[in-house]
Image: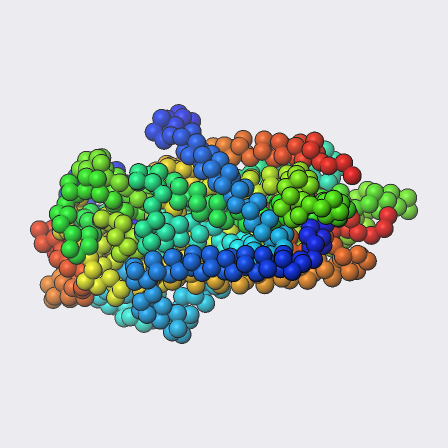
Amino acid sequence: MSAQNVLFDAPGPKARRNIRIVNILGVLLVLALLWFAASGLADKGQFEAAKWTPFLEWSTWQYYLLPGLLSTLKAAAVAVVTSIAFGLLFGIGRLSAFKPISWASGIVVEFFRAVPVLLMMVFFYQFLSKSTSVDPSQVPFWAVVIALTLYNGSVIAELVRSGVFGLPKGQREAGLAIGLTPGQSLRSIEMPQALVAMLPALLSQFVVILKDSALGTFIGYTELLEYARRLASGEGNILPALLVTAAIFIILNMLLTFAAQRLSRRLGARAGKVLQIEDTIEPEGIEAPAPAPAKGAAR
Amino acid sequence: MEGFTALFEQYDVVGAFWVNIQLAFWAALWSLILGTVLALMRISPIPSLQWFGTAYVNIFRNTPLTIIMVFGSLALWSQLNVSLSSDFTTNFFRLAVLSLTVYHAAFFCEAIRSGVNTVPLGQAEAARAIGLGFLPAARIIIMPQAFRGAIAPMGNVLIALVKNTTVAATAGVAVETSSTMKTMIEFYPNLMTQIFLTFAIGYVIIVIPIGLLTTWASKKLAVAR
Amino acid sequence: MRKTRYAAAAIAAVAALTLSACGGGSDSGSESGSTEGSGEKIRIGIKFDQPGLGFKDGSEFTGFDVDVAKYVANELGYPEDQIEFMASPSAQRENMLENDQLDMIFATYSITDTRKEKVAFAGPYFVAGQDLLVPADSDIAGPEDLEGKNLCSVTGSTSAQKIKDEKAAGVNLLEQPSYAECVTAMQGGQIDAVTTDDIILAGLASTDANKGKFKVVGNPFSEEKYGVGLPKEGGVVTCEDINTAITKMIDDGAWEEAIKKNTEGADYTFNAEMNPPKMDACA
């Protein structure tokens, strides 16, 4: 039911009037809420210029927000690459015909999908802090990357698996019929299609990675939120700092989401039918319900 | 190993998990309600409600939960003097539930909307044909089917919610699992792997049944088409 | 950030006043850095997020720890352009010294017996005490007045726990990720006091945004000797040289000036019974 306006008739004159009334009431309600928040904050002096002007100064961006953003993007980018590698490895491992491998992969994937990222981050931070092989200034970075990789990699492994399962059976049968081994068929026929199909879901997983990188502030990784808090401890403006940080995250994530939508539409167009995905992005790290082509291409 | 078991006498690990489970329960309840309202807004005929639902989802789905949590305790409580209980500890528990609710409602909304997407067009057309307006059609025809189609994604949101309760440490909930684990590791660094595995397995024990249950339920309740 | 892990050790440290502090740094063959320091950089670990003590303010480093570190390094033959400041968070300090990733640490590093098993200490260069920060017009005079009041500290803080266990059982304890959040909450009026080491509190209260709004109660209920962390073996600087430098800094007034400068506006006077500190003997 992608065309949602079939839920209701085109409004007549009376309905239009009612809609207009509700619209006005809705706007008033939102304005009232905003006013309540704003006046409360104003009472507490949160709108003092001194709390906000730091964000108009270049040095704030130069020394706090931009380096923070850079670290956030760095951790997220590395985690994206390692998560994909992890996901491919264990996703394919789970599809293996050799039972011990598929079982072992299954246990790894299920385990790391169930453990909160924050617990992993805290543990790996302490663990790497005590080891000798990691440059101490890089310990928080690697703790963040490892924790993000184990969780998101496991989610991607499930994407890979459901992507392959979502393919028409005939693909595999055709592969076997022309004399490929099951492994060859998986590699050269099924995986390429599954990967294309899972791309939109993969992109939305990047949103999860980017957001979860903010957990790094718990272990002192100098990402955006951590820098915002340091800035705030000097300027005494934690609320404005949090608002600006949230705005930056929202913009970045909306760009990623937008890219995911564009991509899914393009892939859908290629498959000859518009996909259902709309702007329904998979919530927090979840295997997509058999992604794209399952519903598309004729079979 | 003896030192390890002695740890359980010193720290209330089970109690810590109980706090997280309570957080998850209340947050799940409220965010399911709020998420349903938001989903109805998004598919409603009224533009301002659609706009509000969309804006809500886009803002909160894209904000790190950590920031929302810090806001809950620092903006609402300490700046706006919003207090949800006269008892100090209960107040922070409820603020954490509120923050979790605000964040996860956006995901429940999207899960329910994806459930709406599984309902065939003909159902809505039939509802209109027999003269049902938007709300009756949604209540009698669309939503019952949508919820059944949304069980699997809602289960996934629930799992994420259970795990995200660990972030409540930022909102002043002190006795939950992540802060308990952190304190234990700091006191007993030589037992850190055992301590971590204890907590990790605790979450596996909670999360895997939820996953199995929702998968089973989504198959059992799937609408045959 | 003061962490619980060090709680027992911190108490033990008081009992260990007479024990020697420095490890085997002196037998490593490297003589005083003042003669061979030319050209080489010295790596000093500080906090980056503790206003008034060790704070990375844009490209600058400020705070009392930083000022002492600069003075001492200069005495050892490392002028400011030969200092490389690195972040040394609490959880990593011992490890960074053991792995030769740092030469010295000035990072609110309390001298304790547990730590002495792994690292050596010079100093102390300051004796802090756990204390309370309250709004400037508050009548709270000590931890005993906190009954029924709201107290804020960081997760796992020993000083907050001590107040709850020994001084005021009815205190409401809020734990936050960092002191900045505590101070923000106190500005909003919901928190009556923040607790940790007095000089850390003074540093928080002396930031531009907080000047004049808060005061340190000045009724410390513990003793934390801030030492200079050194590797047990193979250090490039010796405990004796550092102690000489600190003593010189105290004698020529630069020490007191550094405290005044970094706690300005906080209505804070350091505990004169314990300060300026006497150097512990080096091993």
Residue plotted at (19% across, 52% down): C134
One can see residue C124 in this view:
no
- Quarter of the image where one finds residue A176: top right
Q: Is residue A248 above or below residue B7?
A: below
Percent of width and height locating residue A142? 49, 52
One can see residue A126 in this view:
yes
Residue plotted at (66% across, 48% down): B133
Residue nearest the observer in this picture, B140 or C185: B140
Residue situated furthest left in the rendering = C273
Judge from the rendering whether residue B158 lies leftward or rightward of residue A225; answer left or right.
right
Residue nearest the observer in this picture, B170 or C263: B170
Residue plotted at (79% across, 60% down): A270
Percent of width and height locating residue A144? 49, 51
Q: How has the structure been colored for display?
A: rainbow
Label total for image: 0
Residue plotted at (69% across, 57% down): A10
Q: Is residue C80 above or below residue C173?
A: below
Percent of width and height locating residue A214? 47, 54
Percent of width and height locating residue B123? 74, 44
Residue situated furthest right in the rendering = A178
Judge from the rendering whether residue B184 lies leftward or rightward of residue C262; answer left or right.
right
